[in-house]
Image: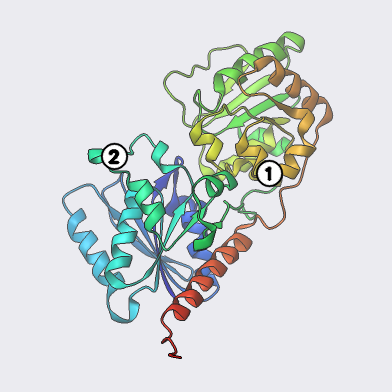
Amino acid sequence: MRVLFIGKRFYTNRDTLLDRYGRIYQLPRHWAQQGIDTRLWLIDYHSKQRVQQTQGALPIDSTPLRGPAWFAATLSTLASRLRGSERPTHIVASGDAYIGLLGWLLARSIGAHFVFDVYDKYDEFTGYRKPLGWNLFGFLLQHADRCWFASRRLLGQLGNPNRGDALIMNGIDLDHFTAHKMGAARQCFDLPTATPLVGYFGALNRERGLPDLIEAMRIVRSIDSSVELILAGKADAEITFDAPGVHYLGNLDHEQIPWALAAVDVVAVPYRRSPFLDAASSIKFGEIMACRRPLVATRTPNLLDNFPAQAAELDAYLAPPQNPAALADAIVRQLRDQKRVDPPAGMEWAAIASEALSSLAAACQNQALNTLPRTRH
């Protein structure tokens, strides 16, 4: 088995190459560690410099799609990836529908098995287009040899079990997301040592419920004015931080997030309902649990479908979406109770990668059976 994994370099506000972030990095990394001939090809929509390096056993090629050299770099990458003994038997494409189309075209041109990795509802991305009404996302879902989905809702809505489609959830990097001492964490960000702190760390926008959280904290502070809100992440222009008791730490580096989690008494995830977020599988829930932080959240499919046992344990600390008063009550209870839950077993990346590898191995077996000569009777 030889695997070419094609993925997006910059996604969810992180750099796959430098942050060594997410499924696009972790799946091929663990396959390579297990001795599978695996290469990672990153498609870079933002910068202009081509990067070629090897991290551990994994060769990585980051190819920019900007600047005058992108076409030559892409041809060079294709030539080196598809020739003779290095020709992949399996191509996995992840990141968006356009990267999926590239993977499908390459797989069909060389006879490789094509896996379309769907970690989000790609047709909800702002950059998704339907030229002349053609639905590329739907085409790939129909014509891939199999699909992987990062959430149970995506698998249920879009998957085809008869084809071998599988749930391959996002995993937790347990080397990175681990508990730290609160005192040391607060010193990192120059936060007060004795003040009760509530935190949210991630994209700061309406869809993720930031106005609801800020209003909920206004209610909490009307009960106890010592409680403060700590925010970090990429903020939409419409989100303001001028409310009393609200502190914005900026868009923190990936390596700083576990320390930010450790610095607060309660972590809030106030997501609203939307087709995009309802179908997603936000691994931040698992990361918060792995860092042993008390969690308050809204009752959305993102949490309830993907972490059902943990959501049941946290039921007293969950609120309806877009209900700041109920969210404030949940925050007050969690500040008092400090209820923690463990993440689901088997959510570390090594286990998730092994599940995905088993899916690829099953594809190999099916492909071998389909090529056997038929016996005449």
Q: Nearer the viewer, residue 306 or 257?
A: 306
Residue at (30% x, 46% y) in the render: 47
Question: From where the camera sits, is residue 180 visible?
Answer: no
Q: Secondary structure at mark 1?
A: loop
Above or below for 130 versus 207:
below
Front: mark 1 or 2: 2
Determine the CA span between mark 1 and mark 2.
33 Å
Percent from the top left, x then y, of residue 303? Answer: 64, 38
Q: Point out the image quarter for the N terminus.
A: bottom left
| Left or right position of 218 against 54 | right
Of residues 77 and 309, which is closer to you in this image? Answer: 309
Q: Secondary structure at mark 2?
A: loop
The amino acid at mark 2 is Lys
**Nearer to us in this view, 55 or 287:** 287
Query: Is the residue marked by circle 1 packed among few (<14), some (14-19), or many (20+) residues within 10 Å?
Result: some
Residue 193, horizontal then vertical, whole percent = 73, 27
Mark on residue 54?
Answer: none
Which residue is identified by label 2?
A: 130
Report which quarter residue 304 is drawn in.
Answer: top right
Check the image and report above or below for 10 versus 144.
Answer: above
Residue 204, given in percent of the width and then of the height, sits at 51, 27
Write the residue at 56% across / 56% down: 168
Q: Is residue 59 visible?
A: yes
Q: Quadrant of residue 40 in the image? A: bottom left
User: Disc 1 designates what residue?
Assistant: 307
What residue lies at 27% left-to-right and 39% top-to-bottom?
133
